Amino acid sequence: MKGLLVALVCVGALLTLSVAPVLANDVGGSFVVTADEPTVITVSDGDTLTPLTEVTATVIVTSPGALTGMTFKVYYDASGASTDGTEFTNAGTGNTQTCYVITWDGSTFSGSPNSSTTWVLGTCSYTAGTGTFSLKFTPGKVATATTGDAKWQMGATATNATGPSTPAFSSTPASMNLRTEIKAIPTSFAWGTVPAGIDYGDGTASQEALGTVTVIANGSYGMDVSTSSLTWGTATMVTDTPDATQEFAVRFDDDATVAGATQLSTTPQEVLAGGLSAEAGNDHTAINFWLKLSSIFTAATYNGTIVIVVG
C-alpha cells in the first residue's frame, strides 16, 4: 500500500508541474452579408392615355438598402406583349413618338425627351418610408396612337448599392388616344377677277392653290373639305353643271390637275390622308381648287367659307 501511495503522489506532482499559466488576447472575427438588389413590386397608372393630358404613374419598390436611383419608361409596343428586360432596354432613352423616360438620381427627377418638346414632366416625389414613387407626366402631341394590338407599356427599375433590379411592368398596358391638329393654314385665298362662263382648267384663272396646311398628328388621319353654305353672296353653289343665272361650282383635289377632282358641297369629303408626324407637323402643299361659273353672272365680289377638318 505504501508503494501505491507514493505513486499517486508522484502523479499528482507531475500533473501540477505541467500546467503553465496562459496569457490570452482577444482575436476579432467578422462576416459580410451582401444586400439584395431592390424589387419593383408595383407599376400602375390609368389604362388610357391622351396627348397633352397629365397622368400619374405609381412605382412601389422594396429594398434592403437605401435606393440610389430609379428609371421609369412608358413606351410604344406594337405587339402589346413586350414586357421583358430586353424590350425595356431597347425602348431607348426618349423619343417624342415612342418613348418617355423619367429618371431619379437619388435626389432629382428628370424627363426625356425634355421640355423643348410637348412632353412634360410634372411634379414627382419619392416617399422612402413606403418605397413609393409618384410620377406625373404629360404625353406629347405625337405620342403614337394605338390601334389593333398595340399598347403603351410602363415599366420601372430601381437601384441600390448592390445594383439595379429586374424591370417590373404595369399589369394593364395603356392605349393612346388619337389626336390631330391643324397647326397652320391660310386664313383665305382668292381667285381674283374671273370672267363669267369660266370653265374648269389646269393652269388657268379657274385654278387656285390653297397654300400650305400643316398637320400635327399622332396617327393616321384624313383631311375633309366642305363649304359652310351653298350661298356665297347672291351666287349659288351647285354640285353639278352651273347653267342658271348666278350659279357656280367648285372642285378640289390634292394635286395640280382637275381630272379626278371632287365637287365641293356642304358634305365633308376627303381630299387626302396622312399619318404620324413629327412635332413640327406634316406639310400639305398640293391642295388646289377649280372654279366654274355660269355664263350669266353679275359683276361683284363673292365671298364664302371653305371648311377644312382633320381627324
Image (spheres, rainbow, N blue to C red):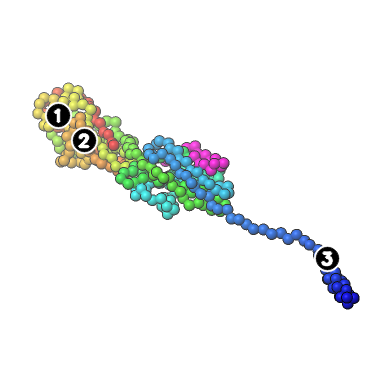
Q: Secondary structure at mark 3?
A: loop
In the rendered structure, does residue 63 fall within the stretch colored magenta?
Answer: no
The label on residue 21 is: 3
> Mainly helix, strand or loop, the magenta region?
loop
Is label 3 or label 1 in front?
3
Query: Could you tell me how far apart the alpha carbons at marks 2 and 3 are, in whole angstroms?
Result: 110 Å
160 in relation to 259, above or below: below
Q: Quadrant of the C terminus?
A: top left
Which residue shows up at 48% across the image and 46% down it? 41
Q: Quadrant of residue 262?
A: top left
User: In the structure shown, which secondary structural element does the residue marked by tag 2 occupy?
Assistant: strand
From the image, state whether disc 2 or disc 3 is nearer to you.
3
Neighbour class for label 2 at 10 Å: few (<14), some, many (≥20)? some
The relative height of residue 248 versus residue 89 in the rendered view (above or below) is above
Looking at the picture, how far across and down is residue 109, in whole percent?
51, 42
Locate residue 293 relative to residue 61 in the image: left or right. left
Between 8 and 221, which is closer to the camera in this rendering? 8
Residue 238: mark in rendering: 1
Residue 129 drawn in magenta: yes
* Relative depth, front residue between 202 and 15: 15
- The disc labelled 2 sits on which kind of residue? Gln
- The disc placed on residue 269 is 2
Question: How far across and down, in percent of the image, does residue 252 sit?
Answer: 20, 36
Screen quadrant of the N terminus:
bottom right
Left or right of 56 on screen, residue 198: left
Camera sees residue 208: no
Residue kind at label 3, given as amino acid type: Pro
Can you tell which quarter of the image residue 242 is in? top left
Q: Is residue 4 left or right of residue 115?
A: right
